Amino acid sequence: MKFLNNQIEELNLKESITKKLKENNIITIKDVWSLKRKDLKSYNLSDSEINQIIIKLQLKGYDLNKKTY
């Protein structure tokens, strides 16, 4: 769970995605993890950008909506 407190840069997302998240005060991985796809859509993220976020989280053992594996 310590990983969740890290900065979103640790997910190695595209710079444009990181920028959009930061503009919406999404700073830590925990901030992203607690969101739903619908929330990310409201931040003007495309489906492919959202999918990239989901994949990067899953590689770390997490999923949107606060799910862990």
Image: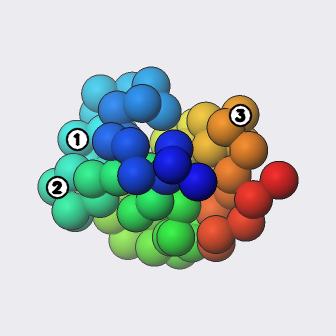
| Circle nearer the viewer, 2 or 3 | 3
Location of the N terminus (image quadrant): bottom right
In this image, 27 relative to 41: left or right? left
Q: CA distance from mark 1 to mark 3?
A: 21 Å
Q: Nearer the viewer, mark 1 or mark 3?
A: 3
The residues tagged by marks 2 and 3 sit, at their Cα atoms, a distance apart of: 24 Å
Which is nearer the N-term, disc 2 or disc 3? 2
Query: Which three-letter amino acid code belongs to the residue tagged 2?
Result: Glu
Which residue in the protein does label 2 denote? 23
Q: Which residue was labeled with disc 3?
A: 59
Q: Which residue is mark 1?
A: 19
Q: Nearer the viewer, residue 31 or 55?
A: 31
Query: Horizontal and vertical percent for residue 25?
Result: 21, 62
Task: Please identify the residue farthest to the right as the structure is shown.
Answer: 69
Residue 60: where, in percent of width, then height?
67, 37
What type is the residue that disc 3 sits on? Answer: Leu
Q: Residue at x 69, y 51 (%)?
A: 62
Seen at 50% across and 70% down, the residue is 35
Q: Name the kind of residue labelled 1 in the image.
A: Lys
> Residue 6 vs residue 62: left or right?
left
Q: Is residue 10 above or below residue 25?
A: above
The foreground one among 54 and 10 is 10
